[in-house]
Amino acid sequence: MDKKNSVQFELGEKQILSINYNDELCGYVMIHFCSDNIVKINGIYVFENYKGKGIASSAMQKLTTLLQNNGVDLVFIQTRLDNNAVVHLFDKTGYKLIGTNYHEVEMKDNWVACNDLSGRLLNITEIAYKLYDGFNYLSNEQVNKIRDEHKNANLVLTRTKKKR
Amino acid sequence: MIEIKRIKTSEEFENGISALIEIFIDEYPYYKTWIKKIVFNLN
């Protein structure tokens, strides 16, 4: 690890946290403090054998509370447009879809979701523009339209698979 | 009971990075490059 990033981890700007269930390691989450009060969740992973037990949802809630208790105002997270399971997780844990951003290397859009923990920051959209290259703000109506499109796409895929 | 803990040892850190890369590699092929870039600052 280069010195700059090593220092960032030592200072806690970037952190990998373990998710433990009844004292057993069952996953990891990576977070990035963009500032003292703004955090990006860069990835959350629950081991396969612990899935289906609501651990990801509980971990997200626990992490969010932890960040809130440490003075964090805003938490951002991303997922693929068609990852309905993760979008549902966002719904359950208070993360609101606020727009998309285009990933130039993968050539696809991702959802950008945000949890406003304090209500103190009024310029959430401006912050998202600064944090995510190619961020595109969406109204609730636009968000719902895209969600519907991807829900339907998944249904078609399921039906196609069943026919085979 | 769920707990979120800060990783302290370098071994735990390496395991965490490996696990995160492994799980996202199918869904996001770029994730491995990306995570290495943000962790190890590779270009």
Image (tube, coloured by chain):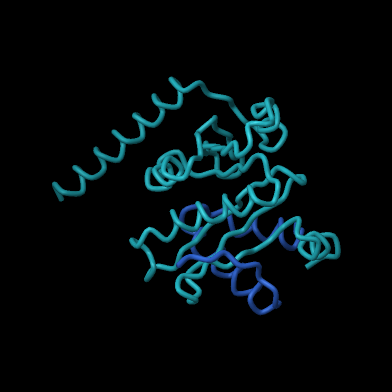
> Residue B14 sits in which quadrant?
bottom right
> Residue A160 sits in which quadrant?
top left
The extreme left residue here reads A163
In the rendering, at what x and y percent does residue B35 appear? Answer: 65, 58
Relative to B8, say whether A36 is above or below.
Answer: above
Left or right, A162 with reference to A86: left
In the rendering, at what x and y percent does residue A128 appear? Answer: 66, 33
Question: Residue at the location (72% across, 57% down)?
Answer: A14
Q: Quadrant of the N terminus of chain B?
A: bottom left
Relative to A95, say whether A27 is above or below.
Answer: below
How many numbered marks appear?
Answer: 0
Chain depicted in cyan = A
Q: Nearer the viewer, residue A60 or A144?
A: A60
The extreme front residue here reads A69
Question: Residue at the location (59% across, 36% down)?
Answer: A116
Q: Quadrant of the C terminus of chain B?
A: bottom right
In the rendering, at what x and y percent does residue A48 appear? Answer: 39, 68
Q: Colour of chain B?
A: blue
Q: Nearer the viewer, residue B6 or B42?
A: B6
In the rendering, at what x and y percent does residue A114 appear? Answer: 57, 37
Q: Nearer the viewer, residue B43 or A144?
A: A144
Left or right, A42 with reference to A108: right
